[in-house]
Amino acid sequence: MPQRDEDIYASAPLRRLLDEQTRVLTPELQRCFGTYALLLDASEGDAPPALPLLGCWISLRLDNGCYRGAVQATADEALPFVDDAFELVLLRHVLEVAPHASALLSEAVRVLAPGGVLALTGVHPLSVWAPWFYWRTRGKSQVLRMPLQLSHHLQQAGLEIERVQRVGRGWPGLMPVRTPATNPFGGGYVLIARKRRRMATPLRIKQASARVPAKGQLSPSTRRSSAL
């Protein structure tokens, strides 16, 4: 019988689910390009996906209410980055361990550049995985969230949802089973959204008065209403 452990994300079922989610996400993110990308993770030692068009990854792990990695901060604070800093933000199961998931999601939107991509992964709450997940994390504060709820939050924040899909096997068995990465009854999900670009404000051209020289004539292209 499987036993509860301290780090559920190091368990064999979750490791396989993380691999399947990465396998689904990576082709979708190959088009992302820019200078900086941000990975917020719930498990230790996970490398970000290899994306050739992105220059540099900054990785943070949320553990016991604190961010650890490239910078050190508490989860109660705003992310220590300026607005619009990243062309890609990847939240990998981190909302499940965040003390304030809605605030973290808003912060992820804030640091995402216009036109940039926000990618989310997690365990689906309406799956056979959910009872297993809560049993393995008994006594902790992990909360599973519906992708539909997250999509609504992101749309309200000005993002366009590009993909929401169930991923992985339908049950967290210990024995490896060959299954397609995408599965309508999968235990995990991936969500991809894009931040809308800011609309350029058109400038209103101020009409200048045209002075007519003495005994002169107006150009055919000049409107007589603008002449003094």
Image (tube, rainbow, N blue to C red):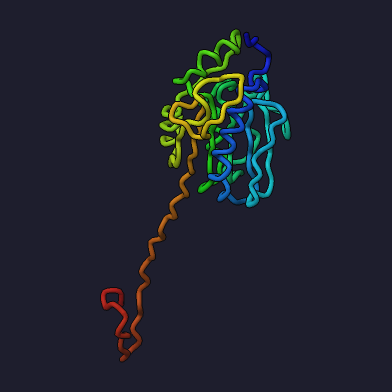
Q: Nearer the viewer, residue 219 or 83?
A: 83
Q: Residue furthest left?
A: 225
Question: Can the viewer see residue 159?
Answer: no
Q: 211 or 186: nearer the eye? A: 186
Where residue 182 appears, as percent x and y from the top left, is: 49, 34
- Residue located at (54% from left, 27% from top): 122
The residue at the point 56 percent across, 33 percent down is 107
In-image side of 147 versus 68 (left or right): left
Percent x, y of residue 134: 55, 13
The residue sitting at 61% across, 19% down in the picture is 174
Which image quarter: residue 104? top right
Please state the horizontal and vertical placement of residue 143, each as a whole percent of the image: 53, 18
Find residue 106 and report its horizontal and vertical position in percent: 52, 32
Tell which residue pokes out farthest to the bottom in this image: 215
Q: Quadrant of the C terminus?
A: bottom left
Front-most of 41 and 79?
41
Residue 22 location, quadrant: top right
